[in-house]
Image: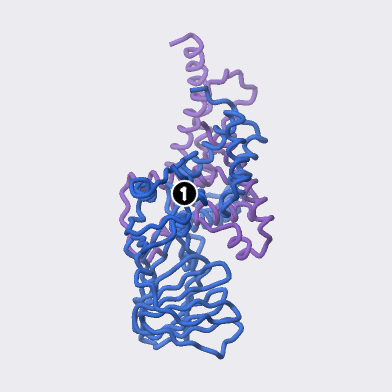
Chain colours: A blue, B purple
Amino acid sequence: MAQPQSLDYATLEAAARWYVDLRDDVPDETVREAHRRWLERDPRHVQAWERLGRLQDKLGQVSPGVARPTLASARAKRRDVLKVLSLLVVASGAGTLAWNTTPLSTLMADQRTRTGERRRVRLDDGTHLQLNTATAVDVRYGDNLREVRLLAGEIQIETARDTLARPFIVHTAEGSIRALGTRFIVRSEAGRTLVSVQEHAVEVRSAHLPDAAVRVDAGQQVGFREDRIEPLLPANALADAWTRDMLVANDWRLADFITELQRYRPGHLGCDPAVGALRISGAFHLGNTDAVLDNLTSTLPVRIRRFSRYWTTVEAV
Amino acid sequence: MSSADLSLQHAVHTLYEDHHSWLCGWLRKRLGCVDHAADLAQDTFIRVLTQRKTLELREPRAYLSTIARSLMIDMFRRRALEQAWLETLAATPEPVAVSPETRELVIETLMEIDRLLDGLGERTREIFLLAQLDGLSYVEIGRRMNVSVTTVKKHAVRALTHCLLLIED
């Protein structure tokens, strides 16, 4: 193998740009081909691409729920300390520096999971909040209301009886869901919220029609946008499989399955349109998406092509 | 041991004899703590030894205090991080038990990430953390921060390039 070379700014910036371009959207074949050619053109491109992987590994060593608030509050503390320090230098005064200057902030009111992570959180009143992959919520408990704002991703709520009898409401970009003593899932998609109820019932309101509430009972699900609520449908019985770290597919198109699996996996995961219409069923462990992919090759005429840890496609054999 | 190593050791030894107690006093005035001052003075001389530069110093005290100052800032940095980390853990709804090894590892990694992000603007840093730690999409980040996706991506490219420059192969 060739010796690593020193990489210039332009090469690293190009790698960063590829990463950013490929990260969120499913690129078409032209873009993927262009990326492939870029990698093949120069070993330094591969080297830069692998360095991106190492950066991801480094960041993956710490739990984001802890790392982000820690880094933010450490920075604030440091500013305070440096202020104190500059005073000390002038005054040459003695006395140890106080480390508890920053009051314990409300930083942790916000709960987040990274891609592939799932977490269960118990809120003050005993309500259980479960966060699926790549999810962000703000929790606000006031005197009159218990409110959760779903900023991204998917959550399951299991409400507890509140001693103060405060209503429990989940807000999304498209509207709100009021719990009626219950267990339910809220999933945020582009411009749409999907609610499925496992126990008892909720009331759903879309943002533009706050007076038109729709009641959704256990075993039902409903999608809504900011200006309309779709018809009620029977709930997907396995909508909550992720709370048990499972992904259950029942005669899904492979393309849909891969799109769903992508949610739990950092980096790009693509599906060749030539195999997208194949059908798949089964229960898969979300803890190891690589194993899930490898498993596909034994049941379907597909192969897994890995360019690097963060670039994977499912293709025809 | 080569003769260069020997002469370096000799030079550091002289430096130590002449300036160690001055440096301890200098640090004590700034830290207000005898023990920390002694530790950092020690670390300063270790740093001088490991830098292996020839020691024909015209202003040895300025040289020593520059090194001591950067070590002091590192120490503040580490303490601020440790403190912030403990507070964050304390605010987590579920009790967390952390072994000393894990604690060391987590703090060290956080220090590394913190250093990587040095020199980035507030917004670039925030966008980087939301994307890389929280795994939010650029569209979501744009919505949260009220800026266009193009702007988010521009900051993301800048932050990633900055980090890639600092990472070694």
Q: What residue is rendered at 41% in x and 47% in y? A: B106
Q: Residue under circle 1?
A: B79
Q: Residue at x 44, y 82 (%)?
A: A168
Crowding near pointer 1: few (<14 within 10 Å), some, many (20+)? some
Q: Quadrant of residue A159?
A: bottom left
Residue B33 visible from this viewpoint: no
Q: Which quadrant of the figure contains the C terminus of chain A? A: top left
Q: Residue at x 52, y 17 (%)?
A: B11
**Which residue is farthest top?**
B3
Which residue is at a point 59% across and 60% down the rendered structure image?
B141
Q: Position of residue B155 (x, y in %)?
A: 65, 51
Q: Is residue B51 above or below residue B30?
A: above
Q: Chain of mark 1?
A: B
* Res A282 → quadrant: bottom left
Closer to us: A33 or A280: A280
Q: Nearer the viewer, residue A87 or A77?
A: A77
Q: Horizontal and vertical percent for residue B113? A: 51, 45
Q: Confirm whether residue B148 shows in the render.
A: yes
Residue A148 drawn above or below residue A303: below
Q: Left of A294 or right of it: where is A52? A: right
Horizontally, is B87 left or right of A225 in the view? left
Residue A279, image x, y percentages = 40, 57
Total numbered badges shown on the rendered structure: 1
The x, y position of residue A144, in whole percent, is 47, 86
